[in-house]
């Protein structure tokens, strides 16, 4: 065994590294002692390196798996190129919580706005009566409130959250993008606007959800705890909250069903939908197509980083 | 011989063809026999439980009623001997009153409806206090409901029901409906107006016209009719706004616990809101709302109750609704235009135009 070990060690880069470490240790010693120590030190260094290998962090392992996946994918769809992580796991979780709660809320809320509609009766019957349906509505409400709190904390505390927040603030460039996009649709200019990490469409979606959440959660809490609210406010305040809740619900539902569904499902580029919400990744092709500025930025950063590495 | 036979035939045929007076003579004979005893005002019987049963009947008893032309034994057909050996049975109206009868009684299935009803079911279970036909319609002085002095006429029926339902009758009499009825206004509902005529069920029975989920429908029959409500200067909006409110919607979806009209306005004791005894008087609103919303404060009464966001006089609620209406129209218009422009652009590019 020791012979075998020695043979391995003396082979390749690892072997050279071990030899270097051993030599470093033995540098100051007289040759007689050094020979005696050499074998022991060599064996210990070998053991240490093995332990380190075993203790490779799970993160690295995941990264390796991801790279392997990507390589496989690239073999299959080589035109898509590298996959870019667009949304992190936290953000995707938030989106999932939100759409689950919003679906629950719409399904249990809309029948109240359109009780005459045939489907409404079925939906209420599906939940087993109006009482159950209101309970489900409150479960959905709880999830949406959780989402809102989670997102606020995420925005404040995480680096990605802070970066995205600043990037999501609308600016003059967005107005220019809208104008150019419309000109592009009408065939007046061949160039699409070049978007950064967030296009004006995504910025609108984000702030629409913000506005919707504030209105719906605010008025919804009024309606949920009506007796307590009426201790401090007159009844017409509750009526206003009711009106807001009902009207904003319709606006939000229409925006989701028409606008959001068109952009992520019925749009010919996406039909019938992508798995972006699940894995959070965009292909290189999509990045170049839809977020060219961000793509260029990432590429620039990479060349800069690799340049730094080589100079070091 | 042959001549006598012919004469006999002519005589019998003639007797059959003889008009009214001769037949009434036959009935009168029977009446005469009955009134030998029943025609004495003091003719009555002391029952074992101490009650006195009046047995005084005269030729005038049936006069003016729908059974004017009937003889005693047409209904009391089990009476065969005088004096009666057994007590004559209660008259069974179903003898004539069924669909398809040939006695000339109205062709109606009301008797079947009655047997389905709470009253008929109680009779079927053997409840001796449950009412039979004659308890409401009367025995000898029976008249159509349209006749003013009928026991079941619009103005008298409440009193008739009140003979058994005394507490409810007392409440009804002081309610706005009862008071208006006493003033001779025929538009207000008496008992059958809400409960139905023969198909009367307990309010806990889903068949009932005043079952929790059907109450608003009952009230709306009149309270959503401009023709009726304009006579009294009452708004018809509440019927519609209730239907749109959460209470109304939940009720339409079958909730029995959610508030219906009578949860707030009262059942038999409905009074106008300015009446201090009214459940919806602003002073009493917290208590009324508090029945379902424990801890309801005085603020429950601040603001219009049946508020319609589409009407300008709803104030801030109207303006909220208007703001959201235009926000929705504006936003959706912009988004849809964007979608169509996008699709237009795609089509152009697909066609190879630039």
Image (cartoon, coloured by chain):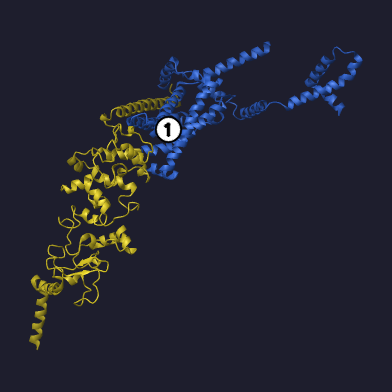
Residue A112's place in the image compared with A87, above or below, is: below
Residue drawn at (29%, 55%) of the image:
B200
Q: Which chain is yellow?
A: B
Residue A29 percent location from the top left of the image: 87, 13
| Mark 1 neighbour class, 10 Å CA radius: few under 14, some 14 to 19, many 20 or more | few
Q: Which residue is mark 1?
A: A257
On screen, residue B77 versus residue A138, left or right, reads left
Q: Residue furthest bottom?
A: B1
Residue drawn at (87%, 19%) of the image:
A37
Residue B122 percent location from the top left of the image: 32, 61
On screen, residue A7 versus residue A270, left or right, reads right
Secondary structure under the numbered disc 1 in the rendered image: helix
Residue A271 visible in the snapshot:
no
Residue A173 visible in the snapshot:
yes
What is the drawing colour of chain A?
blue
Total labels: the figure holds: 1
Residue B47 percent location from the top left of the image: 24, 68
Image quadrant holding the N terminus of chain B, namely bottom left
């Amino acid at each position: 065994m020791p012979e075998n070990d020695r043979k391995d060690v003396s082979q390749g880069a690892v072997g050279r590294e071990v030899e270097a470490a051993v030599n470093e240790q033995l540098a100051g010693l007289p040759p007689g002692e050094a020979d005696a120590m050499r074998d022991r030190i060599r064996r210990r260094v070998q053991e240490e390196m093995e332990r380190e290998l075993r203790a490779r962090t799970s993160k690295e392992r995941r990264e390796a798996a991801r790279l392997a996946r990507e390589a496989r994918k690239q073999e299959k769809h080589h035109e898509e190129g590298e996959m870019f992580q667009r949304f992190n796991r936290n953000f995707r979780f938030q989106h999932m919580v939100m759409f689950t709660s919003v679906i629950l809320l719409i399904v249990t809320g809309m029948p109240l706005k359109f009780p005459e509609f045939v489907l409404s009766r079925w939906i209420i019957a599906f939940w087993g009566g109006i009482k159950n349906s209101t309970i489900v509505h409150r479960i959905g409400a709880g999830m949406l409130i959780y989402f809102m709190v989670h997102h606020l904390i995420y925005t404040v505390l995480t680096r990605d959250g802070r970066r995205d927040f600043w990037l999501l603030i609308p600016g003059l460039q967005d107005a220019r993008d809208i104008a150019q996009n419309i000109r592009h649709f009408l065939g007046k200019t061949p160039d699409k606007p070049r978007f950064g990490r967030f296009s004006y469409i995504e910025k609108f979606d984000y702030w629409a959800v913000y506005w919707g959440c504030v209105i719906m959660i605010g008025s919804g809490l009024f309606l949920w705890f009506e007796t307590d609210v009426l201790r401090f406010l007159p009844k017409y305040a509750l009526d206003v909250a009711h009106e807001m809740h009902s009207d904003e619900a319709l606006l939000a539902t229409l925006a989701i069903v028409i606008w959001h569904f068109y952009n992520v499902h019925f749009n010919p580029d996406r039909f019938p939908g992508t798995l972006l919400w699940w894995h959070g990744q965009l292909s290189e092709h999509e990045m170049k197509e839809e977020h060219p500025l961000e793509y260029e930025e990432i590429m620039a950063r990479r060349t800069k980083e690799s340049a730094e590495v080589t100079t070091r | 011989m042959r001549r006598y036979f012919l004469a006999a035939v002519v005589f019998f045929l003639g007797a059959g063809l003889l008009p009214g007076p001769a037949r009434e003579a036959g009935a009168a004979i029977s009446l005469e026999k009955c009134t030998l005893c029943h025609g004495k005002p003091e003719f009555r019987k002391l029952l074992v439980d101490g009650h006195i049963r009046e047995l005084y009947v005269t030729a005038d008893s049936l006069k003016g009623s729908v059974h004017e032309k009937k003889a005693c034994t047409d209904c009391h057909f089990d009476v065969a001997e005088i004096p009666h050996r057994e007590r004559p049975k209660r008259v069974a109206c179903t003898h004539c009153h069924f669909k398809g009868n040939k006695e000339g009684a109205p062709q109606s299935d009301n008797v079947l409806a009655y047997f389905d009803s709470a009253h008929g079911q109680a009779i079927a279970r053997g409840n001796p206090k449950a009412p039979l036909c004659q308890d409401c319609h009367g025995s000898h002085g029976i008249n159509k409901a349209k006749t003013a002095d009928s026991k079941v006429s619009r103005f008298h029926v409440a009193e008739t029901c009140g003979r058994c339902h005394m507490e409810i009758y007392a409440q009804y009499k002081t309610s706005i409906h009862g008071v208006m009825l006493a003033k001779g206004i025929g538009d207000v509902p008496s008992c059958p107006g809400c409960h139905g005529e023969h198909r009367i069920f307990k309010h806990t029975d889903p068949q009932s016209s005043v079952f929790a989920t059907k109450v608003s429908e009952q009230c709306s029959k009149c309270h959503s009719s401009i023709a009726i409500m304009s006579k009294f200067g009452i708004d018809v909006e509440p019927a519609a706004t209730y239907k749109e409110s959460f209470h109304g919607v939940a009720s339409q979806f079958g909730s029995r616990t959610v508030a219906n009209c009578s949860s707030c306005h009262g059942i038999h004791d409905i009074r106008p809101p300015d009446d201090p005894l009214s459940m919806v008087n602003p002073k009493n609103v917290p208590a009324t709302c508090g029945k379902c919303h424990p801890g309801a404060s005085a603020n429950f009464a601040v603001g219009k109750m049946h508020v319609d966001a589409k009407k300008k006089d709803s104030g801030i609620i109207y303006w909220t609704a208007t703001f959201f209406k235009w926000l929705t129209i504006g936003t959706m218009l912009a988004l849809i235009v964007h979608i169509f422009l996008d699709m237009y652009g795609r089509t152009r590019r697909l066609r190879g135009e630039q």
